[in-house]
Image: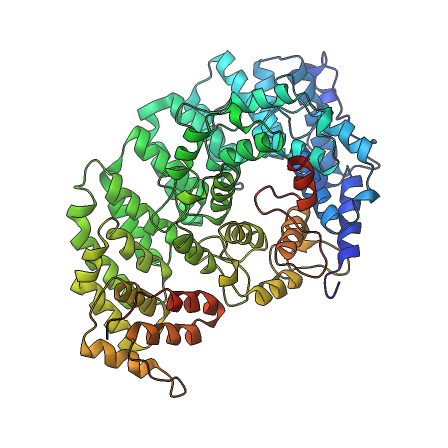
């Protein structure tokens, strides 16, 4: 809406019976610019209908104007909901309205909450639309926290699990560093009523994760995901040859070793017996200035203190809390 | 105070408080009470709270109270937990909690606890662990935490704990530093920190520090000054703050200042705002930078304010 073409509400026939109410928290504005004139007037009329509790079609239109000017004003949204209920408005049309203001405000709490409220009322009928909507948001920002929260709610309350694992796959193919997608993958594997649960999917998930690690060993997410796959059975983590083998591969490649060393440290702390190959790989990483240590776990800590020096205190603490080595 | 442009930041905040008609001020009108809390707490940490008109602000805060007992973001706005906490925090700063009808406010908060122990932000029902923190912090400051079902509140928070030791907004949601602060803060206030795996979470939190020394909120995201608060306060509450490089973080926060005009931004060279100014200064206080007033990591209020409430 161009400012030049806008007819002020005070000059519109439809609003001739309403006395606008100004914000009473301070002195009057000095010389308002065009935008803020439109804004002030819209909000002054909004306050009038809000205080009169007028739940009419013209109030509905007014809340839409106010929201377009400032989508963060939660009081406007709440009043709009009251009007929607009073007028029994078609909520799918309301979703059209929400769609239209979402692209400019992807992280606005009020919009997401309004959407949730609508989806709750529309129920299963809104399932596909909501999954599709979050998908379009992820095309702009695949880590949008609000969108993930909404999508998880949709899956748990309305359904639609069929393609979710494949969707995670798709997102990870686009950006394997997307921690939200890894989190969603875990969410699907552990909660989907269509899959067999974590234990039955563990082996294939470990293979998938190992592949991702080898491609980008500096990627924090798959390392955490790997640990998560063994939640509740850490001894299996130690015994899985895929895990120790990926550590060895990464250390040998010597591209980015911090997470591999950290995983190895966890394994050693759980009683893992390193192979000769692994011992050699660790030795290759120790600096000449480092004193040799028969305790391989201590050696790993020493390397980490150097290569991840920002967290030197953490690695020092890990070293000090290692289980006693039986020589 | 070394490189902290304290005077400029105080001037910036006081000027923002007076401006009522510029674009920024007008579009944040509905959350003014949050802005006031951020600004006033910052000014207090910088030792200049006497520069503001205490009675004027207290009077304005009380005008934001709704008949339900909750507070809105400004005069004439609907009540919500978020603004209720800010209201109580502001009154605490000014040692004016005594102007409140404690029963009225606390009943509003209590009414928002759900069957499963979670909290809704307001009558419209949005659930988020942020609201668990807000409710618990607020009731604790009002000395009536026992009015809610604390056990259920704690168990809901614990249900939001993830395998990486972190917490999300709801069960299964991705660990996020902001949500972690809320959950860890709430657990601390209710004496339930034993539910936190401090070593595991401490490691996740210290991994938030990136090369520049700043902190991000999730893996592979950009650093932001506000995480200097949320990550840092969480680390302090679980006693693992020595796991990050404090000097590097101090440098990062100082680099986010606009030393000429005052204010702090989310990262170096971006536009400043009151939100990031507060988190930057609060972060520096937690890092014991220079002689800034100490701030409590769980209540997000100066320690002397918290002591005044609990050591009466």
Residue B161 quadrant: top left
Is residue B295 visible in the rendered structure shown here? Answer: yes
> Percent from the top left, x then y, of residue B122?
53, 25
Residue B311 quadrant: top right
Q: Residue furthest bottom?
A: A288
Image vertical order of residue B94 relative to residue A82, above or below: below
Report the side of A66 relative to A130 (left or right): right
Nearer to us in this view, A116 or A309: A309
Residue at 37%, 22% in the rendered image: A122
Residue at 24%, 45% in the rendered image: A189
> Percent from the top left, x then y, of residue A178?
38, 55
Q: Quadrant of the N terminus of chain B?
A: bottom right
Image vertical order of residue A296 relative to residue A99, above or below: below
Is residue A106 visible in the rendered structure shown here? Answer: no
Nearer to us in this view, A173 or A203: A203
Nearer to us in this view, A234 or A52: A234
Report the side of A214 relative to A311 (left or right): left
> Percent from the top left, x then y, of residue B302?
67, 45
Image vertical order of residue A24 relative to residue A260, above or below: above
Nearer to us in this view, A232 or A60: A232
């Amino acid at each position: 809406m161009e400012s030049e073409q806008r007819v002020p509400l005070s000059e519109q026939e439809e609003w001739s019976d309403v006395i606008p109410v100004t914000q009473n928290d301070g002195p009057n504005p000095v010389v308002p610019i065009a935008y803020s004139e439109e804004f002030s007037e819209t909000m002054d009329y909004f306050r009038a209908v809000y205080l009169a509790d007028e739940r009419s079609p013209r109030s509905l239109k007014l809340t839409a104007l106010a929201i377009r000017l400032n989508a963060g004003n939660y009081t406007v949204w709440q009043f709009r909901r009251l009007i929607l209920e009073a007028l029994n408005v078609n909520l799918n049309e309301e979703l059209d309205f929400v769609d239209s203001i979402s692209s400019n405000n992807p992280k606005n709490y009020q919009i997401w909450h309004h959407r949730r409220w609508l989806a709750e009322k529309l129920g299963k009928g809104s399932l596909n639309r909501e999954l599709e909507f979050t998908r379009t948001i992820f095309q702009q920002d695949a880590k949008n926290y609000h969108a993930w929260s909404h999508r998880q709610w949709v899956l748990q309350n309305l359904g639609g699990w069929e393609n979710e694992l494949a969707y995670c796959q798709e997102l990870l193919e686009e950006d394997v560093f997307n921690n939200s997608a890894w989190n969603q993958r875990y969410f699907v594997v552990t909660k989907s009523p269509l899959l067999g649960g974590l234990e039955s999917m563990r082996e294939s998930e470990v293979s998938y994760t190992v592949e991702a690690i080898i491609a980008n060993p500096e990627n924090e997410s798959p390392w955490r995901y790997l640990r998560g796959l063994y939640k509740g059975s850490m001894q299996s983590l130690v015994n899985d040859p895929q895990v120790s083998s990926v550590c060895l591969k990464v250390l040998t490649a010597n591209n980015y070793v911090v997470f591999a060393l950290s995983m190895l440290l966890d394994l050693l702390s759980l009683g893992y017996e390193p192979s000769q190959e692994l011992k050699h790989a660790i030795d290759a990483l120790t600096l000449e200035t480092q004193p040799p240590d028969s305790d391989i776990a201590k050696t790993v800590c020493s390397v980490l203190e150097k290569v991840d020096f920002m967290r030197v205190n953490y690695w020092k603490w890990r070293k000090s809390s290692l289980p006693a080595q039986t020589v | 105070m070394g490189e902290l442009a304290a005077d400029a930041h105080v001037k910036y905040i006081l000027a923002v408080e007076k401006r009522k008609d510029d674009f920024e001020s007008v579009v944040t009108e509905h959350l003014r009470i949050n802005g006031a809390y951020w600004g006033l707490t910052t000014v207090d940490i910088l030792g200049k709270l006497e520069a503001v008109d205490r009675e004027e602000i207290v009077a304005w805060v009380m005008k934001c109270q709704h008949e339900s007992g909750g507070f809105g973001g400004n005069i004439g706005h609907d009540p919500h937990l978020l603004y209720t906490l800010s209201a109580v925090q502001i009154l605490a700063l000014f040692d004016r909690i005594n102007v409140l009808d404690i029963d009225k406010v606390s009943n509003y908060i209590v009414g928002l606890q759900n069957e499963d122990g979670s909290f809704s932000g307001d009558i419209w029902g949005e659930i988020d662990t942020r609201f668990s923190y807000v409710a618990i912090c607020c009731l604790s400051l009002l000395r009536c935490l026992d009015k809610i079902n604390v056990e259920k509140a704690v168990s809901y928070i614990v249900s939001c704990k993830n395998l990486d030791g972190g917490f999300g907004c709801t069960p299964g949601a991705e660990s996020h530093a902001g949500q972690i602060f809320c959950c860890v803060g709430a657990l601390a206030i209710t004496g339930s920190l034993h539910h936190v795996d401090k070593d595991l979470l401490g490691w996740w939190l210290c991994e938030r520090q990136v090369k520049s020394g700043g902190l991000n909120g999730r893996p592979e995201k950009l650093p932001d000054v506000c995480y200097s608060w949320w990550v840092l306060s969480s680390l302090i509450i679980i006693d693992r703050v020595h796991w990050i490089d404090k000097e590097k973080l101090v440098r990062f926060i100082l680099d986010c200042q606009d030393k000429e005009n005052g204010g702090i931004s989310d990262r170096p060279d971006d536009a400043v705002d009151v939100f990031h100014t507060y988190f930057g200064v609060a972060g520096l206080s937690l890092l014991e930078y220079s002689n800034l007033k100490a701030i409590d990591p769980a209540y997000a209020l100066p320690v002397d304010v918290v002591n005044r409430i609990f050591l009466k």
